[in-house]
Amino acid sequence: MSSAAENEDAAPGKQNEEKTYKKTASSAIKGAIQLGIGYTVGNLTSKPERDVLMQDFYVVESVFLPSEGSNLTPAHHYPDFRFKTYAPLAFRYFRELFGIKPDDYLYSICSEPLIELSNPGASGSLFFVTSDDEFIIKTVQHKEAEFLQKLLPGYYMNLNQNPRTLLPKFYGLYCMQSGGINIRIVVMNNVLPRSMRMHFTYDLKGSTYKRRASRKEREKSNPTFKDLDFLQDMHEGLYFDTETYNALMKTLQRDCRVLESFKIMDYSLLLGIHILEHSLKDKEEESSQNVPDAKRPGIQKVLYSTAMESIQGPGKSGDGIIAENADTMGGIPAKSHKGEKLLLFMGIIDILQSYRLMKKLEHSWKALVYDGDTVSVHRPSFYADRFLKFMNSRVFKKIQALGSRHRPDLVPSTPSLFEAASLATTISSSSLYVSEHCPQDRTTLYSNSKGLPPSSTFTLEEGTIYLTAEPSTVEAQDDNASVLDVYL
């Protein structure tokens, strides 16, 4: 049973004072994390390698770390605490899956002080990042930790089959107990590297109900914006080469179906945008300031942890968007509607929300007052479909070259069959009829428009309508008719 403190949000202290979480100073939490993980990972080295069994997901190991020290633990200047490790063998197996060696894991977390990050969300959680930028450590509530425990067998079965994913990668689940208070933490992959400045950061759900950054959030030096802000700032979307776009959408579709199968909803896509043209200016500013914590080792420790690796991309810049010698930090190359060269960093976050009774009641209540399809809380299948539609139609689009030099080189992504048919209908809605002589495998439409050459042909290829005009060698039966070929 959770205590009353379980539901307390983080309460930031006064300015220049450190934060507290459940009446515990953040410095004590950071120290306990380093001591506890240092002990549990070191203790794992004595256990032989073997396959993970189902019961391994439900094992909980516990050690007591008194401030004066013991035969097993070192002395420390924090209050006495107990440190619990959930599914230690299972998490060891999956750290190995991502190429994380025990020494590297210990060095990243325990060698230097953890860096506390500001929290843009409303959960009240504390966020820490390791000094080498590899891992994020987040405090979670009891229900979230409990849900992750139940999720582990199926979730990691999927992750084991497909390690390249935008879903969060959990490397450890722990609990610090002190003074009757439980503080649960998870260790995850870091989506946004601090050494690469994010000129824009968005938390996108595909929802429009109250999805705008608050005034308080906008006043921050690095605010996190939301869906309505994106539609206002990036109304034309972000553009990729065809290969990268297809890989990204395939990954998002697969990940959303996995989340739907686990009845998970209310997740977000955390999107960081770095504008390459601003890099030189950023470097000049950084050189004039001392930024000791913005360092990163030359060798990446964790496999498939960058955005480009996560979407099964080739790991190269797409179609010359980014210079080959550019330091992309694993970002996905893209362009804005203005033609600016971008690097995108992204990952799906906040997946520990199950569509249970309270969420159903929350959606039912909001649906009575507002449009039920616009609120963020929704049944998992609808949430996944709306999320994907928003990403596919409003956020991510394809760069395509059109035959006409007067048309822009940036066009929307591939529409659905219904949208394509609607588009064709709109072009010549005045008077269209189907030729009885056209073959069955294509649709030939005729228009009475006199503005087109006699043999103007519209061809729909990958969502783009191409217009070609050639001199007619055979007169049409009706001199006023033009042929409009739409291949669907």
Image: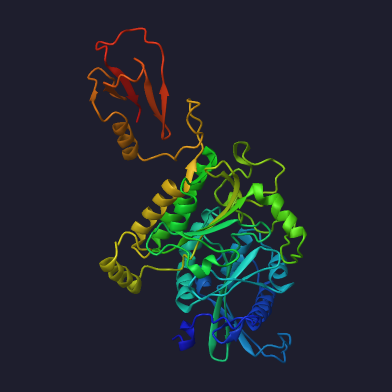
Rendering quarter of residue 91: bottom right
The C terminus lies in quadrant: top left
Taking the spot 40% from the left edge, 68% from the top edge, the residue there is 354
Residue 202, position as x, y percentages in the image: 51, 58
Residue at x 35% of width, y 27% of height: 487
In the image, taking residue 359 as reference, residue 413 lies left or right, namely right
- The answer to which of 441 and 475 lies nearer the viewer is 475
How are the colours assigned in the image? rainbow
- Vertical side of 168 occupied by 320: above or below: above
Tell me where residue 463 sits by quadrant: top left
Q: Quadrant of the N terminus?
A: bottom left
Q: Position of residue 366 (x, y in %)?
A: 30, 68
Is 441 situated above or below 5? above
Residue 313 percent location from the top left of the image: 58, 45
Q: Is residue 466 left or right of residue 126?
A: left
Closer to the camera in the image, 333 or 425: 425
Instruction: Kindly identify the residue that appears in the image at 72 percent across and 60 percent down.
Output: 296
